[in-house]
Image: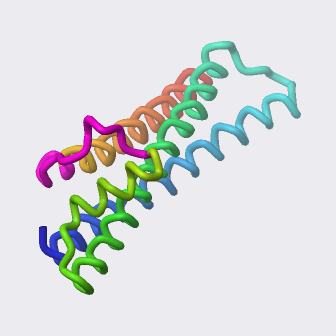
Amino acid sequence: MSPFELDAMAALLRQGRWPDAASRGLAAAALLWLMLDVALAAAPLDIAVRALLAAVLVLALAQGYCAIRIGFDAELLAALARQARADGADAAATLDAALQRLRLLPAGKAGRDWPARWRGARGWLRRQGVLLGLQALALVAAWWRAG
């Protein structure tokens, strides 16, 4: 894998920041709605709306985990690109060895080829997008149900 390909992979993964920001905004809206419901208590929300708003918050937590994983992968790939430019080391072997020493990679996952690694990284981006979509749907459903 060339340093440029590693940089390109890292750049794509860094795009996971915007869904993370959107997810945080949806979670903030749901939390504010719940807090206003408790504070005002004039016409309390029904249980279905509260459940949908709680789902938005739970989905935000899951999306946040995806964002952490995606950000970690992006930083690792950028570091590998810098190292490959400096000394031409085998990026995959270096990555596997470091992650195993830190106990972040099980032995069975070491030695995967780059297409498999790339599929895994893109899978995290897809999960993040699906979670964001579910979050938006839950918030819209809560709004529709409350209206």
Question: As rendered, which of 120 and 59 lies closer to the eye?
Answer: 120
**Magenta-colored stretch includes residue 47:** no
* Residue 94 sits above or below residue 86 on the image: above
Where does residue 11 sit, x and y in percent of width and height? Answer: 29, 69
Question: As rendered, which of 79 and 22 lies closer to the eye?
Answer: 79
Region rendered in magenta: 104-118
Identify which residue is drawn at 31% across, 66% down.
Answer: 77
Identify which residue is drawn at 57% across, 30% down.
Answer: 58
The quarter of the picture where the C terminus appears is: top right
Identify which residue is drawn at 84% across, 29% down.
Answer: 38
The quarter of the picture where the N terminus appears is: bottom left
* Residue 140 sits above or below residue 14 on the image: above
**Magenta-colored stretch includes residue 117:** yes
Q: Residue furthest top?
A: 47
Q: How many marks?
A: 0
* Left or right: 57 in relation to 2: right
Question: As rendered, which of 129 and 91 lies closer to the eye?
Answer: 91
Q: Residue furthest bottom?
A: 86
Identify which residue is drawn at 56% across, 33% down.
Answer: 56
- The way the protein has been coloured in the rendering is rainbow
Where does residue 141 sit, x and y in percent of width and height? Answer: 49, 26
Where does residue 73 sit, x and y in percent of width and height? Answer: 36, 57
* Left or right: 7 in relation to 66: left
